[in-house]
Image: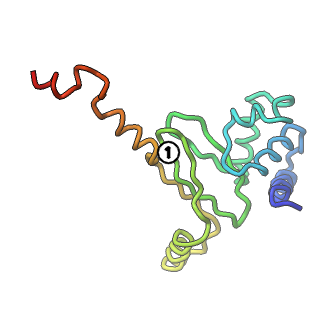
Amino acid sequence: MTPAEDRAVWVLRQLKQHGLKLTLPRLAIVRCLAGARAPVSIRHLAVSPGIREQCDPATIYRTLMCLVELRVARELRLTNRSSHFVLTPLGAAHDYLICEGCGRITELPCEGELHDLEKRFAKNHGFEARRHQFEVYGICDLCRAESKRASEPNSGCVCCQPSFLAT
């Protein structure tokens, strides 16, 4: 089985264990989320093959909220943008940098400094960590560069020319 198939099977088992029906729309949404390489929006799901023929946006939203409530999916809320969703299989950490300017989402490596920090915090407080969520909201390098360009005087504008300003 592929990793995407493993994730889908895990979610479908969780749905069954909680007494929920495995409807065609739910199956299609779970498969799409399981195969995604990054968090996806409702809009992305709504136009995906296999989903657009079976589901309206309300069904997609209700299914996603059900998955979030069961803790098998996570919602990333972008400021002034739509939410994005990602599956959260047990033991798999998904940590992100989220740009408030353009909405770009960058996944952070699961291992390394953040993982070590989580272990240290848990140990120092006598706590058994089972999962975590880490999201850093800010402005990406591309948006910062665009903002800087936008704030510079327009070199093509006569009124912004140094010779015009001196008069």
Question: Residue 43 placed where, x, y %?
Answer: 69, 32
Q: Quadrant of the C terminus?
A: top left
Q: How many numbered tags mark residues here?
A: 1
Residue 4 in which image quadrant: bottom right
Residue drawn at 15 percent across, 25 percent down: 163
Residue drawn at 48 percent across, 79 percent down: 124
Residue 90 in which image quadrant: bottom right
Q: Nearer the viewer, residue 39 or 56?
A: 39
Image side of residue 67 versus residue 132, left or right? right
Pointer 1: what residue?
99
Image side of residue 68 versus residue 99, left or right? right
Image side of residue 142 versus residue 161, left or right? right
In the orientation shown, which residue stands out farthest toward the front? 163
Residue drawn at 41 percent across, 38 percent down: 146
Residue 6 in which image quadrant: bottom right
Q: Nearer the viewer, residue 9 or 50?
A: 50
Display coloring: rainbow
Residue type of the residue flagged with mark 1: Cys
Image side of residue 32 versus residue 88, left or right? right
Q: Is residue 84 above or below residue 43?
A: below
Secondary element at tag 1: strand
Residue drawn at 61 percent across, 39 percent down: 83
